[in-house]
Image (cartoon, rainbow, N blue to C red):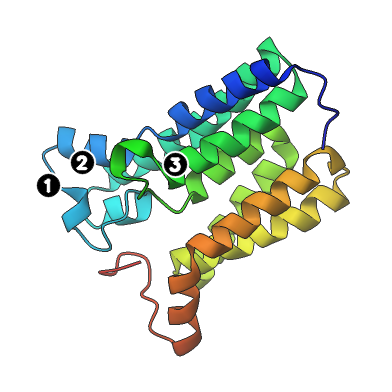
Amino acid sequence: MPFFESSFVVLALWAIIGYLLGSIPFGLILTKAMGLGNLREIGSGNIGATNVLRTGSKSTAAATLVLDGAKGAVAVLAARAMVGEDAAQVAALAAFLGHCFPVWLAFKGGKGVATFLGLMLALAWPVGVLCCATWLAAAAISRISSLSAIVAAVWSIMLCIVLGQGQIFILTVILVALIILRHKDNIARLKDGSEPRIGGSKT
């Protein structure tokens, strides 16, 4: 973790900014704008890119993936540019929480994978790039989105160590723990072999 040199007020401000950015439900917004229906009534009801894919629109799912990642990256990069690394990490955690628990949706948001990848790219791009590559490789092999997400997230902890990114290690562990908690139902289905593959009816 970085030294917290900024004032509490400044860090609190960036926590709010990060949360508000993270809480933008791009999946819901895009599916509605494209006339694809109510995402809450499709597939798993999740607001993330995997569920958007179940509308049949690959382009909308891709746009959701990019925007959900971008909102996390913007929070980090803006906080770092205007304040410093301490504010960047506070904004990162807040953006992730905003995506998972958006106040606008009764705190029922997504599972945070795309936002996590965007955060990692902004916090330490070598770790982020390898996390994305790990997700893609795992998805290509398993065709299971949740498994790919978990593998990439857990691997990011080791990447922080191997690549000398100790300043984000604690934050990464916290984010990975949250991702695993958000995927507890998926993990249960992975164990009993009922977790669907990418493009299936439920995450």
- Could you classify mark 3 by the number of other residues whose Cα lies within 10 Å: few (under 14), some (14-19), or many (20 or more)? many
In the picture as drawn, the residue positioned furthest to the top comes out as 82
Looking at the rendered structure, the kind of residue marked 2 is Thr
Tell me where residue 56 appears, x and y as whole percent. 20, 54
Q: Is residue 11 above or below residue 58?
A: above
Tell me the tag on residue 99: 3
What residue is drawn where x is 51% and y is 22%?
Answer: 17
Q: Nearer the viewer, residue 41 or 106?
A: 106
Labels 1, 3: front one: 3
Tell me the tag on residue 94: none
Instruction: Measure how far apart labels 3 and 2 are at the Cα level.
Output: 17 Å
Looking at the rendered structure, the kind of residue marked 3 is His
Q: Nearer the viewer, residue 14 or 22?
A: 14
What residue is drawn where x is 40% and y is 77%?
Answer: 195
Q: Earlier in the sequence, mark 1 or mark 3?
A: 1
What residue is drawn where x is 53% and y is 70%?
Answer: 141
Q: Earlier in the sequence, mark 3 or mark 2?
A: 2
Q: What is the quadrant of residue 41 in the picture? A: bottom left
Q: Which part of the image, by quadrant, shows the C terminus?
A: bottom left
Tell me the tag on residue 37: 1
- Could you classify mark 2 by the number of other residues whose Cα lies within 10 Å: few (under 14), some (14-19), or many (20 or more)? many
- Look at mark 2 in the image and give the residue it sits on: 31
Q: Earlier in the sequence, mark 2 or mark 1?
A: 2
| Label 2–label 1 contact, CB within 8 A | yes
Tell me where residue 119 appears, x and y as whole percent. 60, 37
Looking at the rendered structure, the kind of residue marked 1 is Gly
